[in-house]
Image: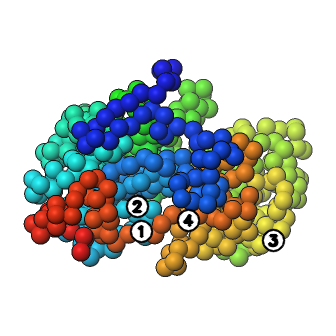
Amino acid sequence: MGDPRPTAATSPGGRTVTSSDHTSPAPQGSPTAAGPAGTSGSPAALKPLEGFRIIDLGGIGPGPFAALVLADLGAEVIRLQRPSEQGVPNSPVLDRGKKSIVVDLKQPEGVAVVRRLVAGADACLEGFRPGVAERLGLGPAELMAENPALVYGRITGYGQTGPRAQVAGHDMNYIASAGVLHQLGRAGEGPQFPANLIGDFGGGGMVLAVGMLAALVRARTSGQGAVIDAAMIDGANLLWAMMHGFAAQGLWREGRGTNILDSGAPFYDRYETKDGQWVSVGCIEPQFFKVVIDGLDIEDRMPGKFGTFDYRKQETWPQIRAAFTEAIAARTRDELVEIFDGTDGCVFPILSFDEAEADVHNSARAVFYRDADGVRQPGLAPRFAPAGGATWAGGDSDGAPFEHPAPAPRTGAHTAEVLRAAGFDAAEIDRLTAAGVVSGTE
């Protein structure tokens, strides 16, 4: 481990940051444990990244998602937008909890404004094609020369280096190149695309957020920043880690729908019910498998009495699948819920988002919420608890009010506020506005 003692770094903008600025919250009961200055101190108000400032230089999909994760954790995230985005509604979900400023990067003064903002920030992130940020004068070499402790996050499909670094692509292309898409789907069918979850968000934005969090910890203890090269092809491959391990152990085969966890096994699949609905069945472990065959009353249709055959051997799967399929198709989804509710059978209905939002467990945990405009929002994840276990930063198990992120801002809503906080005076802001360098200050 590095030296845990506080260190200090001063940016050219005069902002001094020590490694103790953003460390553990004060012990419960201390004057500063209640939360930000001027608040009443509800435990739900505590956020781990409170006090960190992050500039989102631009990009679509995975970059804004990484920024959303960081904003939900309490960071002040400032989204840099272009004049052409004026009047275009921001995403009510991806842009929640953020601030928006409008700066014209086609003007040298616009670049100078952004550099001044980043000089006083803890981190920035961008999702441009490699080399674009450098051509704008906003690459890591320029910005870290002015702010050595800066964490600079970069998200691309193929990474900053390699033969395809400059090649255009999208999520589907990246997970195809990583070998992941080849494995997704049912036996005898073509690859099945899982929306943009694996490349853009799981292997892209989430991996970028994790990398930035690690670099922020290092910067707080060392005063040294870092550049995070988050490539979706790398992240998608990392998400496949367990299956790579299974393959090394002889427990995973090439080919779609031939393995325990890819719909090949009858005890880990989805089945259609009598009323045209669907249920998920995940009874991998023996004790769970026994609950299912008892609940469906199909032990007489198994290859033998429970315990006398290995249901995880592929030669037993066709007979087990036939029994599961017929028994589940003879019952409605609600009947199956009634049979398995409260058991360890691992049989659950496949819900639509409307149904999931109304689900009793999801409602109790506030997995979803509706914002002031009625937009369905995902709740905060993860939840945090201080010593003692009372949930905070998004939970209400301790009776504290559930704290939702601020709604997505209109484009440029915070331009003046952000500039003032960075030390721009009123005359500078007026001049920059009149020249079209910034907008949204009116």
Mark 1: few, some, or many residues within 10 Å (few <14, many ≥20)?
some
Residue 316 at least partly seen: no
Residue flagged by tag 4: what amino acid is it? His
Residue with the most extreme bottom position: 373
Q: Which residue is mark 3?
A: 335
Whole-Å distance between the Cαs marked 2 and 4? 13 Å
Q: Look at the numbered disc 3 and give the secondary structure of its residue.
A: helix
Of label 1 and label 2, which has the lower sequence position? 2
Of label 1 and label 3, which has the lower sequence position? 3
Asked if 7 appears above or below 442 in the picture, the reply is above
Res. 180 image quadrant: top left
Looking at the rendered image, the quarter that the C terminus falls into is bottom left
Mark toward the viewer: 4 or 3:
4
Mark toward the viewer: 3 or 2:
2
Q: Look at the numbered disc 1 and give the secondary structure of its residue.
A: loop
Residue 370 x %, y %? 56, 74
Q: What label does residue 408 carry, if any?
A: 1
Q: Which residue is mark 2?
A: 98
Mark 4: few, some, or many residues within 10 Å (few <14, many ≥20)?
many
- Left or right of 189? Residue 170 is left
Of the pair 35 and 319, the residue shown nearer to us: 35
Q: Are marks 3 and 2 in contact (CB under 8 Å)?
A: no
Q: Are marks 1 and 2 in contact (CB under 8 Å)?
A: yes
Of label 4 and label 3, which has the lower sequence position? 3
Whole-Å distance between the Cαs marked 1 and 2? 7 Å
Res. 403 image quadrant: bottom right
Residue flagged by tag 3: what amino acid is it? Glu
Whole-Å distance between the Cαs marked 3 and 2? 45 Å
Whole-Å distance between the Cαs marked 1 and 4? 12 Å
